[in-house]
């Protein structure tokens, strides 16, 4: 029997995504350490890109569930040093129960999934960041209920986070307003697949108008530091500030996957303000990923 993988939000059905979201909320509210469904199981965490939240949340989640996690940096594996990816996937998956990769190329994760005998999780690629969307959606559901029929404003770079927000809009049936500078829009294939769920706007203010949730990310992601100055010019009108939040709905939330560059993509007044849920969102990486691990590795239905 082929394992279930989580390389993209679209690996889940709408019902499965909602199940994981609600299960994450339940696990957060009932933190019984005697519940250890993954006792004796091992998660291999392969990091070609460094991280704070991804490593801590997955490692802590496995410990909470009675399992363990192996941290593998580029120095600890043969990935990219001559051994074909499909050989690495076969070998590593023969020794562990699940593999999480945080890497550059999305094809690295999909190739691993193709040849792995255990579930493979996308911890981040240059194209998608589905684990963050589990946490973001959990946070919205906790604060405001189901997101179906709501409006989310994505303001900034049409990057991996934007792509995964497009997928979330498709699965959870909300409308995504996107405002990006010219040349920084999401990939056309993501937009085309989303159909009516995605709408583009010329300015950040237009995108944010009457929205229920405003989201952004850094202007220059990891690996794009040499573009910082160019991006500061391109994105200067795409900051989430008090003007943006004031044109959104009165009870609109603000989210950011962190780390944030205060004063660039978001002002301190917004990220520290009453509408910001960024730290609850960050904590929810732990609970959402525990629900995901349970979904992928446990046969028992909850």
Image: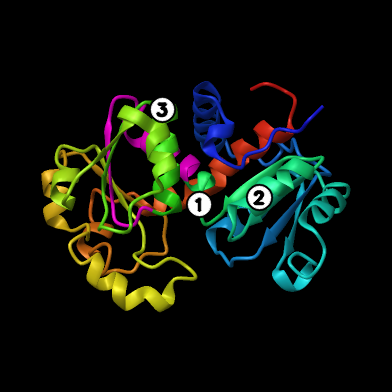
Locate residue 106, reporting x and y percent: 59, 52
Give residue 127's mark: 1
22 displayed left or right of 49? left
Residue drawn at the location 75% of the way across and 64% of the way down: 79
Say if mark 2 contacts mark 3, CB within 8 Å.
no
The kind of secondary structure element at disc 3 is helix
Quick check: 285 above or below 183? Answer: above
- Residue 152 magenta: yes
Position of 291 with respect to 182 (left or right) is right
Q: Residue 221's quadrant in the figure?
A: bottom left
Q: Residue 300 or 240: which is nearer the viewer?
A: 240
Q: Earlier in the sequence, mark 2 or mark 1?
A: 2
Q: Earlier in the sequence, mark 2 or mark 3?
A: 2
Q: Does residue 227 lie above or below 9 as drawn?
A: below
User: Residue 119, located in which quarter of the rendered image?
Assistant: top right
Q: Residue at x 33, y 69 (%)?
A: 261
Callout 2–callout 1 Cβ contact below 8 Å? no
Residue behind mark 3:
172
* Front in this rendered view, residue 128 or 141: 128
Give the camera-side residue of 229 and 27.
229
Task: Give how far apart the Cα atoms at labels 2 and 3 are.
Answer: 24 Å
Q: Secondary structure at mark 1?
A: loop
As helix, strand or loop, the secondary structure at mark 2 comes to helix
Looking at the rendering, the stretch of residues picked out in magenta corresponds to 133-158
Image x and y of residue 266, in percent: 26, 62
User: What is the CA distance from the residue labelled 1 to the residue labelled 3?
Assistant: 20 Å
Q: Is residue 49 magenta?
A: no
User: Which residue position holds label 2?
Assistant: 109
Task: Identify the image quadrant of the C terminus.
Answer: top right
Q: State the scheme by which the image is colored.
A: rainbow
* Whether label 1 touches label 3, CB < 8 Å: no
């Amino acid at each position: 029997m082929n394992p279930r993988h989580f390389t993209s939000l679209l690996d889940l059905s709408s019902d499965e995504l909602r199940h994981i979201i609600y299960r994450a909320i339940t696990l957060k509210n009932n933190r019984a350490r005697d519940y250890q469904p993954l006792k004796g199981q091992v998660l291999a965490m392969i990091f070609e890109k460094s991280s704070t939240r991804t490593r801590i949340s997955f490692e802590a989640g496995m410990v909470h569930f009675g399992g363990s996690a192996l941290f593998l940096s580029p120095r600890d594996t043969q990935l990219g040093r001559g051994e074909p990816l499909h050989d690495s996937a076969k070998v590593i998956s023969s020794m562990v129960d699940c593999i999480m990769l945080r890497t550059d190329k999305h094809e690295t994760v999909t190739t691993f999934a193709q040849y792995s005998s255990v579930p493979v999780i996308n911890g981040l690629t240059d194209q998608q960041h589905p684990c963050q969307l589990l946490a973001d959606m959990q946070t919205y559901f906790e604060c405001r209920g189901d997101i179906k029929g709501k409006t989310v404003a994505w303001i900034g770079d049409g990057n991996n986070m934007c792509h995964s927000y497009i997928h979330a809009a498709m699965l959870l049936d909300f409308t995504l307003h996107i405002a990006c500078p010219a040349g920084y829009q999401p990939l056309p294939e993501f937009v085309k697949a989303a159909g009516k769920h995605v709408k583009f706007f010329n300015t950040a203010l237009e995108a944010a108008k009457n929205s229920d949730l405003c989201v952004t990310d850094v202007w220059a992601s990891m690996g794009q530091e040499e573009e910082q100055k160019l991006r500061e010019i391109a994105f200067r009108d795409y900051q989430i500030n008090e003007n943006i939040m004031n044109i959104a709905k009165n009870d609109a939330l603000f989210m950011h996957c962190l780390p944030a560059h205060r004063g660039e993509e978001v002002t301190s007044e917004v990220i520290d303000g009453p509408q910001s849920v960024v730290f609850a969102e960050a904590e929810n990486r732990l609970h959402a990923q525990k629900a995901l691990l349970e979904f992928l590795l446990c046969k028992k239905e909850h």
